[in-house]
Amino acid sequence: MSAHFVPPNEEQKRNIFRSCRILSEEQLKKDAKALREWLRHQPHLPQDICDTTLETMLVQKKNSMEEAKRQMERYFSERAMIPEFFDDQDPQSEALQTSFDVVHLGICSRMTPKGERITIAKLRDPKSEHFNPAQVLKRTVMMADLRIKFEFSTDT
């Protein structure tokens, strides 16, 4: 699994499924297939979305198909409307590297027993002349993208 995220164990999966009204992994995969079928009829949305991302969106929206569809519409529409925050996501760029000196951002690799993953943010120097909110937002978006892609995987 990428991003060094430890996938949920069986207990965490049960807790996640219970909180999201998902009966089984099979149901989640079936619902992700239905979401993909809807996606095929949305030519304005990208078609190369992996199954794990679809599953994550369903889990994030408590297995509500309609909420997951709305999330996908927003997710991709925002990227088209505000490309300066979503394009050029090179973590080696000078601007993003400077933001590492100003703000600590991290995602815990393991989930809590309830199946939640914690994100931590800390401002290192609130008086820094190098603080660039746009670059911090870009890093936050990059982390959110990682979580959407890898947060919840039923494949262990």
Image: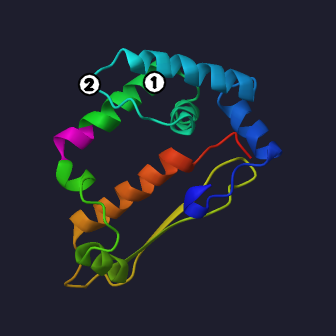
The residues colored magenta run 78-82
Residue 87 location (% of width, % of height): 24, 54
Whether residue 119 sits left or right of residue 77 in the image: it is right
Residue 54 location (% of width, % of height): 52, 32
Which residue was labeled with disc 1? 67
> Is residue 21 visible in this depiction of the protein?
no
Sequence-wise, the earlier of marks 1 and 2 is: 2
Q: Which mark is residue 44?
A: 2
Secondary structure under tag 2 reads: loop
Q: Quadrant of residue 102?
A: bottom left
Q: Quadrant of residue 143?
A: bottom left
> Is residue 149 visible in this depiction of the protein?
yes
Secondary structure under tag 1 reads: helix
Q: Residue at x 68, y 33 (%)?
A: 19
Q: Is residue 79 magenta?
A: yes
Q: Nearer the viewer, residue 103 or 9?
A: 9
Q: Nearer the viewer, residue 141 or 93?
A: 93
Q: Is residue 104 magenta?
A: no
Whether residue 150 sits left or right of residue 45 in the image: it is right
Q: Residue at x 73, y 29 (%)?
A: 25
Residue 66 location (% of width, % of height): 45, 18
Label 2, residues with CA under 10 Å away: few <14, some 14-19, many ≥20? few
